Image (spheres, grey):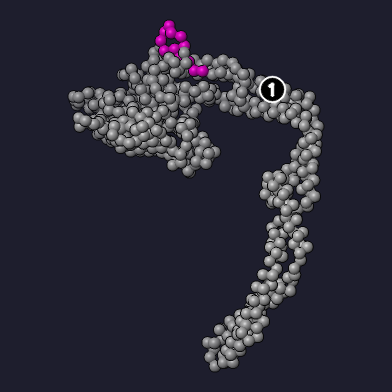
Amino acid sequence: MLSFIRIENYAVIEALELEFGRGLSVLTGETGAGKSILVDALGLALGDRADAGAVRHGSARAEVSAVFDCPSGHPAIEWLSERGLEDGDSCSLRRTVSAEGRSRAFVNNRPVSLQDLRALGGRLVDIHGQHAHQSLLASATQRKLLDAHAGLEGQAGATAAAFAAWRTAAADLQTQRESAADRSSRLELLRFELGEIDALDLADDEPARLRAERKRLANIDRLVHGLSTALEHLYENETVSAHTGLVRAHQALAAIVEHDPELDEPCGQLGAAEIEVNEVATTLLRYRDRLEADPQRLEHLNQRLNRIRTLARRHGVDETELAATAERLRREIGGLDASEQSLAALDERVERAADDYRELAEALSEERRRGALKLAEEVSAQLRELGLPHGEFRVAAGTRNGDATGMDRIEFEVQLNPGLPFGALNRVASGGELSRIGLALEVVATGASPIPTYVFDEVDAGIGGGVAEIVGRRLREIAVHRQVLCVTHLPQVASQGTEHYRVTKHTDGSTSLARVHRLRGEERVEELSRMLGGLEITATVRAHAEEMMERSSG
């Protein structure tokens, strides 16, 4: 859900920060105060078209940031993870627009394309009104909503799986047909390449061991000289070596230790050091005795390493990956050797998969048609309750070539006035009507959409009285299952809000500023009274506002 929004230098907003919670949040204010500007600013953060004219006059740029809390498993989190943009269960969207019209987009403080911002925004918020962000207009959304309402998700999933199986079988057949022509030459090449690697008979960690041995043989003189110098200072010089000094120091302490027990520990430490030096010297002597120049061995090592390096480069892998390359070649050879299945058998497999898909898709189509009638009946009833007395809703289900979603072309259509034909939502409905259609669908198919936040703008356009109260109640009903933000000018709707924000605009004669204030207690009563009674707020109007508040909380 949307938890926080910050707007800077956008239209008549200089600086604004708002926190939102769950449930229904309503935004009210005088006409022209800037209520819908908040929705426009949110749309900008979600990827709507940027307009330099929206940058506040005199400012270098406008910026809108929106923070969302996403539960585990939400599609937005999955989308972020796939692109390496995840940041726990929080998601931050930011959009800047310069006065010259240049726009930049960020997700979790990392730059993204506008296309990605829109894709993510569509998983977080659905704006109902005259906004490009409304997912309800998308055919895929309409199909999913129909399936959810009719309880067809499982059937649709089985159809998608059958389609995938069909496509996989068809791809296997195509691969087999293409590979049959060059199978022989491919096998010959693979066996030659595998033979080269097998002939190398490369042991585990052999390159590293060979390099270590080569380094030792190539530096034999330096090693002998260094060892001799070290042993001279450590052990072999009987007069000034470290070992001689330790022996003499130990003997001197041992001769006097009986006179003071405090010397026991240092005397023992000298004895231990003498033993350690002796062991180090013995190890170095043995190492030096083993050192022997071997030009032939060195040449062999160079040739062996060159052969390993050449073969690794030929296969485009690291030397340590040659063994894995050999296994890959063996698997491919085995696959080609084992591909004795005839093209006729593969054809039969593809045909069976196609028949399985068609059977499931046709059954799904039949269920969708039944579900479409029920959905249309329920949504039409809701439209009439929501102030569209002549509203009729239907689901046009045409046919098309099958894909993972089935063989149906689903499109929601409405008829809002008698005598006019049915038409697609975006062609026959105004912004306010679209909002109410979206509300009706959400009421009928409660919780069908995974989008956690709904924004309704103009949902109460052209209505009033009892219809407005019904709209408010419906908004509150769906806010039980998701976060809902509603811009409204009707007190019947505003009274249903669990949170209430008032938008005001102030001017000094040369500039205008919009501000938003969160209302509590008496402040809400005052705002509802203003909405009910205009400039003159009487005791009767105030009592009416208090009654509306009590009714909505009851």
- The image shows residue 166 at horizontal and vertical percentages of 68, 26
Expressed as whole percent of the image width and height from the top left, the position of residue 332 reads 75, 39
Q: Position of residue 248 (x, y in %)?
A: 61, 88
Kind of residue indicated by mark 1 = Ala
At a point 68% along the width and 66% down the height, the residue shown is 219
Q: Magenta includes 416?
A: yes
75 inside magenta stretch: no
Taking 333 as reference, is 430 above or below it?
Answer: above
The one nearer the camera, 197 or 96, is: 197
Picture layout, residue 431 above or below residue 523: above
Res. 57 image quadrant: top left
Is residue 198 in sight in this rendering? Answer: yes
Residue 527 percent across, percent down from the top left:
25, 29
**Is residue 551 in view from this perspective?**
no
The residue that mark 1 highlights is: 354
Q: Residue at x 21, y 30 (%)?
A: 510
Which element is circle 1 on?
helix
The magenta stretch is: 411-422
Quarter of image, res 18: top left
Up/down of 374 relative to 244, above or below: above
Q: Nearer the viewer, residue 186 or 520?
A: 186
Judge left or right: residue 376 versus residue 192: left
Please indicate whether residue 349 sits to the left or right of residue 456 in the image: right
